[in-house]
Image: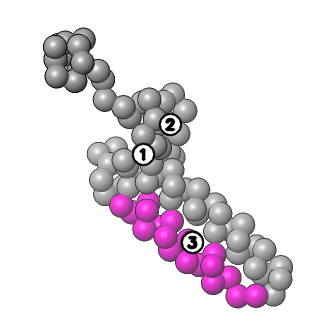
């Protein structure tokens, strides 16, 4: 869970910079970018608080690599599905 929070925080932080640039180019106050940056910082703090690894660039790289390798899942796909019970009989729902 902390890997997903860390990667989401980094992505939102990068997105807030892009949003701020476009807002300034349109001569508007970057309110949305500021809100996105605050949310990104909150996600990074929660991620650093829940993870046992020291917070840094290596933690971001390791989290990204685990996501790419399929060790963590963003949804309830095959990686999140429970393993079938090998001891269960192969009959109908009543076990007959």
What is the CA distance from the residue labelled 1 to the residue labelled 3? Answer: 19 Å
**Left-right relation of 15 to 73:** right
- The region drawn magenta spans 28-46
> In percent of the image, x 38 and y 55: which residue is there?
47
Against 53, residue 50 (above or below) is below
Image location of residue 28, percent across then percent down: 76, 88
Q: Name the residue nearer the viewer: 74 or 23.
A: 74
- Can the viewer see residue 50 in this picture? yes
Residues at discs 2 and 1 in contact (Cβ within 8 Å)? yes
Q: Secondary structure at mark 3?
A: helix
Say which residue label 2 marks. Answer: 67
**Left-right relation of 30 to 50:** right
Name the N-terminal-most of marks 2 and 3: 3
What is the CA distance from the residue labelled 2 to the residue labelled 1? Answer: 8 Å
Say which residue label 1 marks. Answer: 3
> In percent of the image, x 64 and y 60: which residue is there?
14
**Left-right relation of 55 to 19:** left
Image location of residue 36, percent across then percent down: 57, 72
Say which residue label 3 marks. Answer: 36
Q: Residues within 10 Å of mark 1 (few under 14, many from 20)?
A: many
């Amino acid at each position: 869970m902390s890997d997903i929070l860390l990667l989401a925080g980094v992505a939102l932080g990068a997105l807030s910079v892009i949003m701020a640039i476009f807002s300034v180019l349109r001569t508007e106050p970057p309110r949305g970018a500021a809100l996105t940056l605050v949310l990104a910082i909150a996600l990074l703090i929660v991620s650093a608080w829940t993870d046992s690894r020291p917070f840094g660039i290596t933690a971001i790289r390791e989290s990204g690599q685990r996501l790419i390798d399929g060790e963590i899942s963003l949804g309830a796909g095959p990686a999140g599905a429970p393993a079938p019970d090998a001891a269960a009989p192969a009959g109908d729902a009543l076990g007959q």
